[in-house]
Image: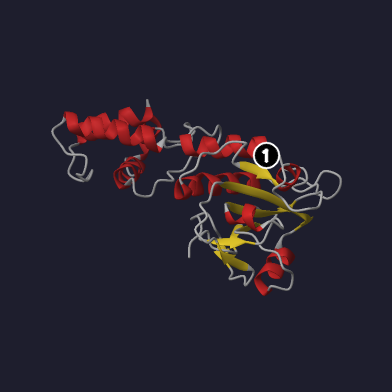
Amino acid sequence: MSWASTIAGSVNSPNQSPRFGRKVTGWIIHHNAATGGSYVLELMRTGKKQVSANYQVMQNGDVWGVVPRESRSWSASNSDWDASSLTFEIANDSGEPGWTISDRAYEQVAKTIAEDSRWAGIPINRTTVRGHREGSAQGDGGSYPTACPGGIDLDRLVRMAQGYVSGSVAGLDAELIQEEDEMAIQIIKEIAGVPNGEKARYGVMGSKSGFSHIQTMNEVNALLKGIGKTEKEAVRGVSRLEFDRIATALTR
């Protein structure tokens, strides 16, 4: 039973089914058509209404796990589409006619999509990330027309999620979403631990948009190989001169 590491908490909804071997190939985005989010989360937790999602996102952007990624949520009135999708219900921060969502909701949903793209091994684009009404128009979303997901800008969401994967989200600290990149994480921790007077030149004072985990690992591996160390060796024990070379490569 798992969700992305972005969740603030989780509940156990009875409204779920097995995927029966179906591979996850994309995401379905819904909006609550309501502000707040607590009421919808409670409906899904108790099963009072036959609806659920893998994630419920609150108005403030907090992401709650509802149906584990391994299971099918009941979101689109179409079991086949749900069985191959990870699904979001997102609380709005305004009502009709805009039905917008908060900036933090965009950020947290994008981070969750970025992490789940690795879990499922699928790309992030406007073919894999669809709103409920798009699926309905293409015959995937059930037999009824819908305006869902309201005013959510799916193009913006996709761009942000792609940015978190590449480490290039402007104005935000792009997170290392590959937890198994232990060496890269250790290096970032080491950089964060240098004396305050030196932090600016290592790009850890907010002057950089973030680190790309792929670029980080490629450069670190190349540097360690060049100084006679294996890719598996921990950063601990690397001399200050060698560490300076690594830090410079990470922040140039």
Residue at x-position 15% and y-position 31%:
227
Q: Nearer the viewer, residue 171 or 131?
A: 131
Quadrant location of the C terminus in the rendered image: top left
Residue at x-position 44% and y-position 46%:
177
What x and y, as percent, mark residue 14? 62, 72
Q: Is residue 108 above or below residue 1?
A: above
- Asked whether the viewer can see residue 38, the reply is yes
**On the rendered structure, is 175 left or right of 32?**
left
What x and y, as percent, mark residue 30? 70, 51
Residue at x-position 70% and y-position 64%:
51
**On the rendered structure, is 77 left or right of 198?**
right
Q: Nearer the viewer, residue 130 or 104?
A: 130
* Residue 91: quadrant of the picture: bottom right
Q: How is the image coloured?
A: secondary structure
Residue on which disc 1 sits:
154
Residue at x-position 36% and y-position 43%:
192
Q: Residues within 10 Å of mark 1 (few under 14, many from 20)?
A: some
Q: Secondary structure at mark 1?
A: helix
Residue lying furthest top = 252
What x and y, as percent, mark residue 61? 64, 52
* Residue 215: quadrant of the picture: top left
Q: Amino acid at mark 1?
A: Leu
Q: Is residue 65 above or below residue 14?
A: above
